[in-house]
C-alpha cells in the first residue's frame, strides 16, 4: 500500500493550517485534555462487485483483531472517518481477510490520507 503521489505534502500542509485557524470550531477537548479532530482515510481501488474494504489498526476504537468496514463512495473510492486525539496506525484488508501489502500507515488527528492499496 502506498500513498498517492503529491497528496502527502498537501495533506500535511492542510493539517497544519487547520490547527491554528479551525481549532475553536472543529475541536473538542475530552477529559484527558487532548484535542479531538477527524481523521479521514480514503482508499482508491476497485475491489470488484461484492467485495468490501476493511480497516484494522490501533488508536481511537480501531483493533488489530477485527476490522471496520469502509464506506463505498463510488466504484473505486472507499472512505472511513473518525475522531482522533492521537496518531492512528492502520492497515487495509480486503473482505477483512486479505491484508494489503506494505507497512502500516499512520494518520495524525485532523489529517486526510489517500492511499492506493495493493493486495
Image (cartoon, rainbow, N blue to C red):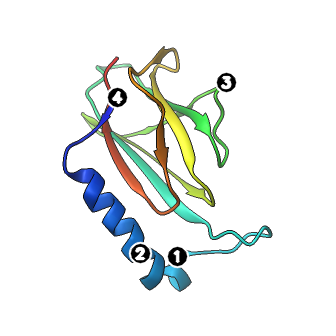
Q: Residue furthest left?
A: 6
Q: Residues within 10 Å of mark 1 (few under 14, many from 20)?
A: some
Q: Earlier in the sequence, mark 4 or mark 1?
A: 4
When asked about the image quadrant of residue 43, the answer is top left
Q: Residue furthest right?
A: 31
Q: Tag 1's secondary structure?
A: helix
Marks 1 and 2, Cα distance to the nearest angstrom?
A: 9 Å
Between marks 3 and 2 in the image, the one whose residue lies nearer the viewer: 2
Q: Is residue 28 left or right of residue 113?
A: right
- Mark 3 highlights which residue? 65
- Which SS class for mark 3? loop
Q: Is residue 102 above or below residue 42?
A: above
At x 33%, y 28%, the residue is 117
For disc 3, the neighbor class at 10 Å (few under 14, some 14 to 19, many from 20) is: few
The answer to whether mark 1 and mark 2 are in CB contact below 8 A is yes
Which disc is residue 26 wearing? 1
- Which quarter of the figure is the C terminus placed in? top left
Amino acid at each position: 500500500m502506498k500513498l498517492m503521489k503529491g497528496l502527502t505534502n498537501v495533506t500535511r500542509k492542510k493539517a497544519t493550517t487547520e490547527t491554528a485557524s479551525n481549532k475553536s470550531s472543529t475541536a473538542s477537548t475530552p477529559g484527558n485534555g487532548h484535542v479531538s479532530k477527524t481523521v479521514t482515510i480514503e482508499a482508491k481501488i476497485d475491489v470488484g462487485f461484492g467485495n468490501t474494504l476493511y480497516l484494522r489498526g490501533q488508536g481511537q476504537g480501531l483493533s488489530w483483531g477485527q476490522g471496520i468496514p469502509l464506506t463505498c463512495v463510488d466504484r473505486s473510492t472507499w472512505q472511513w472517518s473518525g475522531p482522533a486525539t492521537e496518531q492512528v496506525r492502520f492497515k487495509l484488508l480486503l473482505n477483512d481477510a486479505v491484508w494489503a501489502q506494505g507497512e502500516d500507515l499512520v494518520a495524525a488527528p485532523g489529517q486526510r490520507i489517500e492511499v492506493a492499496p495493493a493486495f
